[in-house]
Image (cartoon, rainbow, N blue to C red):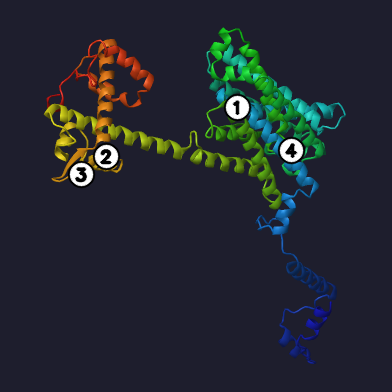
Amino acid sequence: MGDARDQLETLPVVRVSNPCERRAVLGTGWKPVPLSAALIALLLMMCSTASAATSTESITDSSVSIPTAEQVLRVLSLRDYNTRVVVLGTTLLGIAAGTIGAFMLLRKRALMGDALSHATLPGIGLAFIVATMMGQTGKSLPVLLFGAVITGVLGVLCIVVIRSFTRLKEDAALGIVLSVFFGAGVAVLGVVQKMGTGSAAGLESFIYGKTASMLSSDAALIAVSAGTVALACGLLYKEFTLLCFDPAYAKSEGWPVVVLDLVMMTLVVAVTVIGLQAVGLILIIALLIIPAAAARFWTERLSTMVLSSALIGAVSGVIGAAISALAPRLPAGAIIVVVASAIFLFSMVFGPARGVLVRWAEQVRVSRKVARQHLLRALYEWAEENRENPTETGISMKELLAERSWSAAKLRRTLASAERDGLLYEAPGATYRATDDGWADAIRTVRNHRLWEAYLITHADIAPSHVDRDADQIEHVLGPKMIKKLEAVVATEHPEVLVPPSPHMLGKQR
């Protein structure tokens, strides 16, 4: 008030005694302002100024500030009770989802979790309506989850019935159940919102999840469910493995394939229902599929894949919950999925079993191996045709180009690669000669090629004039066991020859 009084006192004062002069100064439309209105306007101006000066945040502010070191240490050390509950709950949920998700992925049921998560929505709405009509608390979590389990299991049965008793494929059954149940759930939630009871607010949080408001009872429920899922997967590991890789063989051996399938889907329903509180029914599919898909890039063993999938799910929950605790404006469920997606992208690129870089490096290695074997075989066949020793007589690029249909640039790259590996060397006169190691590899390459040609002619009834191209596509992957079998095929015809003769013309006469 002192600042306001000072501002009033500093206003210029005009003293006019003559009414005519007063009208000239203030204007013809001047009217006296009431003192109360002036004070109210002054108070409003002061409040707005003070609010702008003292408030640094707004309820509509969505910016994210960088956390301090103390905040990071506080979250990592789990000092806050809510942080401990959320991290524990999301970690256990990630373990359960990753464990059963590995079997789901191998069973080729990746969309099953999506259909089941959407199938739980009408059960939540119906459970709320029934509980309210009976005078109970409609938003009781056990009641809502019980309704979600009922419609989730009903969705599984609908998929099994459509797949088993109609001519529709499983993808069509999944699409039908997903769309119909989700549409019914949205309609039921619309009815709930018009019931006139104030406790209906917040049911839509099951769609997107509300991780930050997780209670200790929710975490305990997730812990029990996660332990049950992990125990069931451990006890039925052999049966689930057989079901995922060869269900036809399992059925022929008398295993109850349908029952095992229903048990697996029941575990998926359990994980889906307990995940509604954490990430919601839309994002739970991400926790069921992304960790398993990421683990697939790291190993070829099922046991290692299941453990890796559970670990990735747990790490996604821990990191996602920690980031959400440091940045409260970021939704925890979405951040958990983003972290899992980042792990998946890293695994897809750098995974040692099926990663993009590993497969690219393998393709480059195989391409170099094939090009080098083609070069050595061309060198041997040129020497065989011209009765020359390639370790003493050099072969020019022109002669090599005539042996095979490759470009000059590709031939130069192959020659440089073979020269670096010590198989060839450039002699005077722009010719290339084979080293002792290169000549030995050339003999081995041509021998394998002609053994396979002999097999195709003898057992596949392929004409000798066409066998060269067919043998050229498979000779690079022949293993030691196959070589021994091929040797037995041609041993009776050429027992003393290291390299069997070609069954077709060589060089330009081919």
Q: Amino acid at mark 2?
A: Thr
Residue 303 numbered tag: 1
Residue visible at 63% across and 35% down? 287
Front-most of residues 138 and 394: 394
| Count of numbered marks | 4
Residue visible at 22% across and 35% down? 406
- Quadrant housing residue 404: top left
Q: Position of residue 280 (x, y in %)?
A: 68, 36
Give the SS element for disc 4.
helix
Determine whether, in the image, residue 387 is placed left or right of residue 41: left
- Quadrant housing residue 161: top right
**Sequence-wise first label, 1 or 4:** 4
Determine whether, in the image, residue 484 is placed left or right of residue 318: left
Give the SS element for disc 3.
strand
Residue 414 numbered tag: 2
**Sequence-wise first label, 1 or 3:** 1
Front-most of residues 410 and 381: 381
Q: Dot 4, crowdedness within 10 Å: few (<14), some or many (≥20)?
A: many
